[in-house]
Image (tube, rainbow, N blue to C red):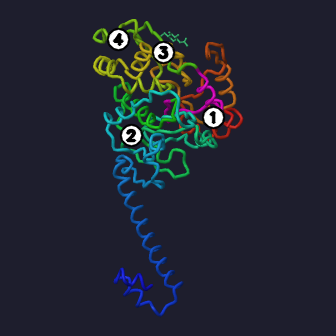
Amino acid sequence: MATQEGKDPGIVTTVRLNQNRPLPLRLLQFCLIFLVLGLGISIVSVNMIRFFGVHTVGPAARSNIIFPCFEESDSIEKWIRPPSNLMHKMNDIELFWRASFVPRINQYPIKRVPKIAFMFLTKGPLPLAPLWERFFKGHEGLYSIYVHSLPSYVADLTQFSVFYKRQIPSQVAEWGMMSMCDAERRLLANALLDISNEWFILLSESCIPLHNFGIIYRYISKSRYSFMGVFDDPGLYGRGRYNWNMQPEVTLEQWRKGSQWFEVDRKLAVSVIEDSTYYPKFKDFCQPGCYVDEHYFPTMLSIQFPHLLANRSVTWTDWSRGGAHPATFGNSDITDEFFKRMFEGQSCLYNNQPDNVCFLFARKFAPSALEPLLDLSPKVLGF
Ligand SMILES: *[C@@H]1O[C@H](CO)[C@@H](O)[C@H](O)[C@H]1NC(C)=O
């Protein structure tokens, strides 16, 4: 004590003031002060990191999420986490550019479970949602859902629905117009933002699944080809819609027709959203009575990736009644017999082998079909 007194008069005063207390208690007091100081400093710095962390990450700040774990922002997590808020503020140009990012190393440095993106192109509500809810139940982690509806439509869903907050920023889409292809590209681009999505299926509000999730997942994931309906129709509604101004990008021989309802893998999805070669040709020279949603994707994918296409759709549609629109099925159509006929008639090539499972989805089903579908689905559809 005596030597300290000589060196530092400051300490001397405090020590003198506390002179009447025993030494162990004074030590405890010092420790407590340091503890409180240390705690204070660490709380301040945690908040500083959070504050700056959110600002440097930018788009994440928009999703109103504060990272629960701040080490994420500089780890690989940041690059593999799917967007937490689908209602981003990007316009189409920004979105497509962002979605076109492609890793150049095929080996993922993480355990990636490939998912199927179910993309619903709708006007408003999904009347068959209860059937889909049942279909998806128990398969979390193997699928993601995206819904493009009229921009004016506000979904009224509870957080328990698989469709809850799965709406993407949408614009008006008209049948047979380029705005329809734009909506489909918008769905693809949004789904591409989740790197775990490997296959992309376009569906409408009148579609139903024809098999359980496991069968559909296996069928899609084991296929060597993407299911895009493609054919060369020599008639008035096929080649008859070709416009010679599309040369040289698209020749008459390359002109194709196909169903709007497709399944593509990630590689083809990127090629669709990055296309600037064929897009302007179709936009300018395929206008009604050329229905662009029946020609743009089939033609441009056939030109670039013929060897990756199955040239058939996996969505069953009944055109047998004739006319411009396929048959719509309602309450009284939905029977055992109806599905028996549908399943019996199937034959196609799957991975170059004959198969009798050709369709995974079917359309069109009216809202009134829901009740009988829910009754029959465990027995007939397998879920
Ligand atoms: C689909 O058609 C293209 C020609 O457009 C052909 O090259 C390709 O082999 C076909 N795919 C299958 C699976 O047969």
Q: CA distance from mark 4 to mark 1?
A: 38 Å
Dot 3 or dot 2, earlier in sequence: 2
Give the x, y percent position of residue 249: 33, 12
Q: Label 4 amino acid?
A: Val
- Front disc: 3 or 2: 3
Q: Label 2 amino acid?
A: Leu
Q: Are marks 3 and 4 in contact (CB under 8 Å)?
A: no
Q: CA distance from mark 2 to mark 1?
A: 28 Å
Q: Label 1 amino acid?
A: Phe
220 drawn magenta: yes
Q: CA distance from mark 3 to mark 4?
A: 15 Å
Give the x, y percent position of residue 381: 67, 33
Q: CA distance from mark 3 to mark 1?
A: 26 Å
Q: CA distance from mark 4 to mark 2?
A: 32 Å
Q: Are marks 2 and 1 in contact (CB under 8 Å)?
A: no
- Mark drawn on residue 230: 3
Q: Are marks 4 and 2 in contact (CB under 8 Å)?
A: no
Between 177 and 263, the one lying in front of the other is: 263
Give the x, y percent position of residue 1: 45, 84
Dot 4 or dot 2, earlier in sequence: 2
Dot 2 or dot 1, earlier in sequence: 2
- Residue at 40%, 6% in the rendered image: 253
**Helix, strand or loop under label 4:** loop
- Mark drawn on residue 250: 4
Between 365 and 259, the one lying in front of the other is: 259
Q: CA distance from mark 3 to mark 2?
A: 28 Å
Dot 3 or dot 4, earlier in sequence: 3
Quarter-wise, where is residue 275 in the image?
A: top left
**Helix, strand or loop under label 2:** loop
Q: Label 3 amino acid?
A: Val
